[in-house]
Amino acid sequence: MKQKKGFVLRNICGENVIIGEGIETIDFRKLIVLNDTAAWLWRQSQEMGDFTIDSLADSLCEHYDVSREQARADVERIVSEWTAEGLVEADE
Amino acid sequence: MNERFYNVAGHVFSLNAGRHDNVIGCMQAYEPFAVAPSDALVFSLRIADKPFADEGVVVEMRQQDEGQEIVVGRQQSGTPQFEFWLHGSRAAVLITSLDYRQGDLYLEGDHRFGINNALMVMYALATADKHTALFHSSVVGCRGRGYMFLGVSGTGKSTHSCLWLKHIGGTELVNDDNPVVRILDKGEVRVFGSPWSGKTPCYRNVSYPLRALVDLRQAPENRIWRLNGIDAYIAIALSVSGKRWERRLADGIHETENLLAQMIPVWHLDCLPDGDAARLCCSTCSGGEL
C-alpha cells in the first residue's frame, strides 16, 4: 500500500500531527495525532513509497529492540487506523 | 515610471501603474503606507497593457466568500495564475513568477477590487517564509496592546471590535479584516494595520505588540476559555491566508502559526453581541492589565 498524496506530518506544539495540505486533501478537515512510534512508521512508509505490513514490521525490528511478533502486531494496528482515516490506500 | 512604493508591516512592495493613471485613483487606502522608492522589495506588481495569452490554465483551487471568488491555477508553462471574480464577473487576472516576487495584473472589471486582491495574494505568498502572516481578523488596540478577533465570515468579529470601542475605554480599531502579524527578532510578536480592511475604511499604519488571539462563536451566553496546543494552532491556521498545497509556502506558514500558537495566548469566546462580552473578553485576555 502507499500514503495518499497531500498528507503532511508536522510537529504542532510538540505533537506529531498529520494534516491535509495538498490539493487532493484540502477538504480533509481533521488532524490526526500520532504517537512517536506511529510517527516514525509514517516517515518510514513515506521513504518506502510502496509498503506492506511486513516491510514496516521488518524496519521496526531493525531499528528498535522489539520482537518480530510484537512489531507486526503494532504495525498492523497502526496501519489499520491509517486505513480507517483514509490516510493510505491499497495498491491497484 | 509610474511606480509607487508601500511599506506594510515592514515589508516594502511596489505597484507600477505604467500608463494606467486611472489606477492611482484606486490607491487612497495605501497612502498611509507610502514610502520613498526602494530596491529592497518583497515583491512588485505591474499593471499589464493587454490580456495574457490563453495558456490553458489548470485550476488548482477555488475560494469563494460573500460574492467574491479567487480561482488559483497554473498555466501549462507552470506560471502561477490567479483570477479575481466579483459577483460573477472577472475583475482581474494576475500572473506571477514562480517565487511570487514579480506579478503582472490585467484589469478587466472593478479596478480597486482587482488591485486589492492581487496585492494581498502577492503579499501573503511573498512573505510566507518571513515569519509573517496575513490574517482574516478584526483587531483592536487597547492601552498599548493588540487584541485579534478570529472566526469565519459572519461570526461577528467586527461587531465584537465595535463592542470594545464602545465599552472599553482607550480602545481603537487597528484593522477590520486583514491585519498582518509578524514574529520579529528577539521574539516580539506585533500586529500591524494594512491597506486591506474589508468593508470598513480603516487603513491605519499602526502596530501593537500582540497580547491575545480570540476565536469567536455566537452563543446564547458569554463564556471564555483558553485554547492550548493543537486547538490553539487550529484556531490560528483557519484564519491565515495561504497556498498550503505548495510545500515551500506551507512550511513557512506552518512555522509561523506553530510559533504563534506557543507564544501568544489563544482564547475561545462564546459570546452575545453585548457589552458584557467585551468586558469579559477584555478582563480575561488582558491578564489583569486593564
Image (spheres, coloured by chain):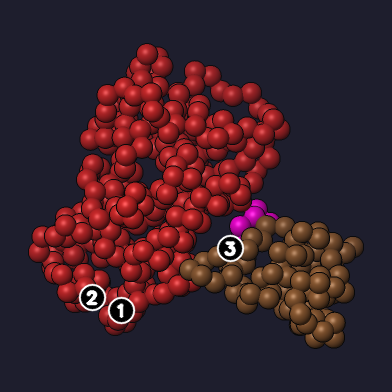
In the displayed structure, does residue B48 sit left or right of residue B200?
right
Is there one chain holding both mark 1 and mark 2? Answer: yes
Coordinates of residue B14 in the picture (x, y in percent): 38, 27
Judging by the rendered image, the residue that carries numbered circle 3 is A10
Coordinates of residue B268 in the picture (x, y in percent): 35, 74
Q: Which chain is red?
A: B
Judging by the rendered image, the residue that carries numbered circle 1 is B224
Query: Does residue B194 lie above or below B149 as drawn?
Result: above
Is residue B282 found inside the magenta-colored segment of the image?
Answer: no
In the displayed structure, does residue B176 sit left or right of residue B236?
left
Is residue A24 found inside the magenta-colored segment of the image?
Answer: yes
Coordinates of residue B209 in the picture (x, y in percent): 25, 55
Q: Nearer the viewer, residue B25 or B129?
A: B129
Query: Does residue B230 lie above or below B146 as drawn?
Result: below
The kind of residue on which mark 2 rests is: Thr
Q: Are marks 1 and 2 in contact (CB under 8 Å)?
A: yes
What whole-number distance in Å separates the C-alpha atoms at marks 1 and 2?
A: 8 Å
- Single out the mark in the foreground, 1 or 3: 3
User: What is the crowding at mark 1: few (fewer than 14 residues within 10 Å), some, or many (at least 20)?
Assistant: some
What colour do you see for chain A? brown
Q: Is residue A10 visible?
A: yes
Magenta part of the chain: A20-26
Judging by the rendered image, the residue that carries numbered circle 2 is B284
Q: In the picture, which quadrant includes the C terminus of chain B?
A: bottom left
In the displayed structure, does residue A77 sit left or right of residue A26?
right
- Single out the mark in the foreground, 1 or 2: 2
How many numbered marks are there?
Answer: 3
Q: Are marks 1 and 3 in contact (CB under 8 Å)?
A: no
Query: Does residue B266 lie above or below B131 as drawn?
Result: below
The kind of residue on which mark 3 rests is: Arg
